[in-house]
Image (spheres, rainbow, N blue to C red):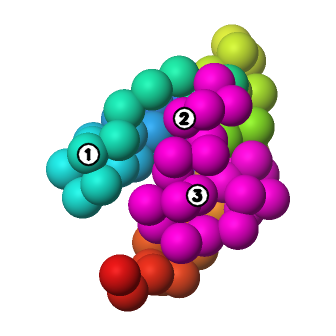
Amino acid sequence: FLSNSNHQEMAKKKIIYFREYLLSNYRLNGDWQDENFRERVAHKTGKQRSEIDEVFDLIMILQAKQSLSSEELLSLNQKIDTFYSKEAII
């Protein structure tokens, strides 16, 4: 099994990739906690604001932690993968 530090590294990479995805696909970049950024993401992606809040809040919580459990990493993966899979067509 992976150690908690590996979970932290994997989460960092997943978050970086997610940020790059928002930038390259929607030209969106900002602070996870910025309300205006969250609104712009919801508007551009066509996703519910509550879904944006769930993903961004989880990212902020996990970034603040020193180590992550496998369950936390799995939760992050599921939230981001759900975000990708519910792609809005604009």
Q: Is residue 54 above or below residue 86?
A: above
Q: How far is the residue under mark 2 from the one under mark 3?
A: 9 Å
Which residue is disc 3 drawn over? 42
Tell me the kind of residue under disc 3.
Answer: Ala
Image quarter of residue 48: bottom right
The residue that appears at 45% across and 39% down in the rendered structure is: 15
Q: Contact (CB < 8 A) between labels 2 and 3? A: no
Asked if residue 57 lies left or right of residue 12, the reply is right
Q: Is residue 83 above or below residue 26?
A: below
- 33 and 7: which one is in front? 33
Residue interval drawn in magenta:
34-55
- 9 and 46: which one is in front? 46
Which residue is disc 1 drawn over? 27
Query: Magenta stretch containing residue 41, yes or no?
Result: yes
The residue that appears at 62% across and 46% down in the rendered structure is: 39
The residue that appears at 53% across and 22% down in the rendered structure is: 31
- Check the picture and name the quadrant holding the C terminus: bottom left
Q: How far is the residue under mark 1 from the one under mark 3?
A: 13 Å
Q: Residues within 10 Å of mark 1 (few under 14, many from 20)?
A: few
Tell me the kind of residue under disc 1.
Answer: Arg
